Amino acid sequence: MGRDGFQGLKVWQKSKDLAVQIYKITEQGMFGKDYGLRDQVRRSSVSIPSNIAEGDERDTDKEAVRYLYIAKGSAAELLTQLIIAHEVNYIDETTFRELEEKCLEISGMLSRLISARSKTFNH
């Protein structure tokens, strides 16, 4: 990748910012007291930028794509957990919609990156 490596990837920046936001949200109110769900949500959120970074550092596009798929799976896992958190009233509608939008945007960006990186070894 570019001079900045994985830190220069917009999808990494957005997913890292989302993880920071998740940490702040999950320390508040009832969410902060539900250690099981809180820790699971935090792990999912951190997994997204972590796997993007690890994939970007891999030697081949094929290896990189594997980690990008893991990151995409973590985004789906995070969204599922946020739906549950919303339904048990740990996060309000406005916050949920904002987080949902970010998860979906990151997932879409990952799909495009996976597609671009896959072209090098699928032809």
Image: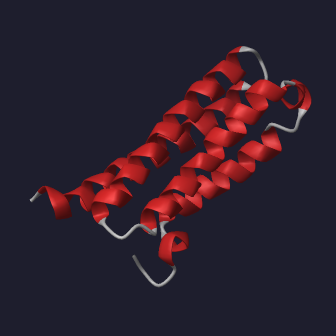
What percent of the width, then of the height, locates residue 45?
A: 63, 44
Q: Is 110 rendered above or below residue 57? A: above
Residue drawn at 59 percent across, 47 percent down:
47
Within the image, what quadrant is residue 58 found in? bottom left
Can residue 45 be seen?
yes
User: Where does the N terminus fall, quadrant-wise?
Assistant: bottom left
Furthest residue in direction left, as rendered: 123
User: Where does the C terminus fall, quadrant-wise?
Assistant: bottom left
What percent of the width, then of the height, locates residue 90?
A: 79, 23
What percent of the width, then of the height, locates residue 106?
A: 48, 48
Colour setting: secondary structure
Q: Is 15 rendered above or below residue 72? A: below
What percent of the width, then of the height, locates residue 8?
A: 51, 73
Q: Nearer the viewer, residue 40 or 116?
A: 40
Within the image, what quadrant is residue 97 found in? top right
On the rendered structure, is 77 left or right of 94? left
Q: Is 54 rendered above or below residue 27? A: below
Furthest residue in direction top, as rendered: 88
Q: Nearer the viewer, residue 7 or 92?
A: 7
Residue drawn at 43 percent across, 52 percent down:
67
Within the image, what quadrant is residue 38 found in? top right
